[in-house]
């Protein structure tokens, strides 16, 4: 069994309900939810002029391989109405694997830890809430240290 940290995000529709439905589907299809961060409202990253996102980090425990987890998450996104129209565009749901235990994975369709995690306040702050002492397996820094070193100045606050 692995502890897996996932980042959920939505900036379209009933964002809080979409995140709730995503978490329910993850619990049913992927693994038991051990922890959930608060919801965080965040400015869009990578493309300005979009509605603000709601983001949440959840920690699950699963016996699935990382690639199987990814496959299930993509299916959940599709079931909830995700359309991939443009990079960093608005979306009803986005589910990213931030960490798969302390594994380092470099596959054509999956890179874990998430390659931009440490650059994104909207991912770091909810992770900091539930796992401040978790050590990033590549950077060898705790989430607390990564949060202190953030240069991303986008607005991120608890809802």
Image (cartoon, rainbow, N blue to C red):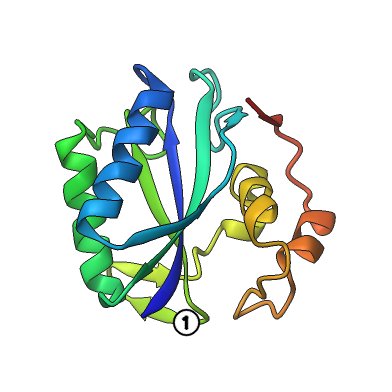
Snapshot quadrant of residue 15: top left
Left/right placement of residue 68 relative to residue 10 reads left
Q: Residue furthest right?
A: 148
The answer to whether 25 is drawn above or below residue 15 in the figure is below
What's the residue at 52%, 42% (across, down)? Answer: 56
- Give percent across and percent down for residue 75: 16, 49
- From the top left corner, tell me how far across and down residue 150 is, in percent: 77, 52
**Residue indicated by mark 1:** 104
Relative to residue 116, is residue 90 depicted above or below?
A: above
- Judged left or right of residue 150, residue 108 is left
Nearest the eye: 35 or 147: 35
Is 145 drawn above or below residue 1 in the view shown? above
Measuring from the top left, give residue 71's x and y in whole percent. 19, 61
156 or 111: nearer the eye?
Answer: 156
Q: Kindly state the secondary structure of the residue where label 1 is placed.
A: loop
Q: Residues within 10 Å of mark 1 (few under 14, many from 20)?
A: some
In the rendered image, the vertical position of residue 107 relative to residue 20, given as above or below: below
* Residue 134 appears left or right of 141: left
- State left or right for residue 106 relative to residue 142: left
Count of numbered labels shown in the rendering: 1
For the C terminus, the quadrant is top right
Q: Can you tell which quarter of the image residue 156 is in? A: top right
> Closer to the camera, 117 or 23?
23
């Amino acid at each position: 069994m692995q502890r897996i940290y996932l980042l959920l995000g939505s900036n379209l529709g009933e964002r809080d309900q979409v995140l709730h439905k995503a978490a329910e589907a993850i619990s049913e299809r992927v693994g038991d939810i051990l922890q959930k961060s608060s919801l965080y409202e965040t400015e869009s990253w990578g493309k300005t002029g979009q509605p603000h996102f709601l983001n949440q980090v959840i920690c699950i425990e699963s016996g699935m391989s990382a690639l199987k987890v990814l496959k299930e998450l993509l299916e959940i996104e599709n079931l909830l109405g995700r359309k991939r129209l443009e990079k960093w565009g608005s979306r009803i749901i986005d589910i990213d694997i931030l960490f798969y235990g302390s594994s380092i994975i470099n596959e054509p369709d999956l890179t874990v830890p998430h390659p931009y995690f440490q650059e994104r306040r909207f991912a770091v702050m909810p992770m900091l809430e539930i796992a401040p002492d978790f050590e990033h397996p590549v950077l060898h820094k705790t989430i607390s240290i990564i949060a202190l070193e953030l240069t991303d100045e986008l607005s991120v606050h608890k809802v």
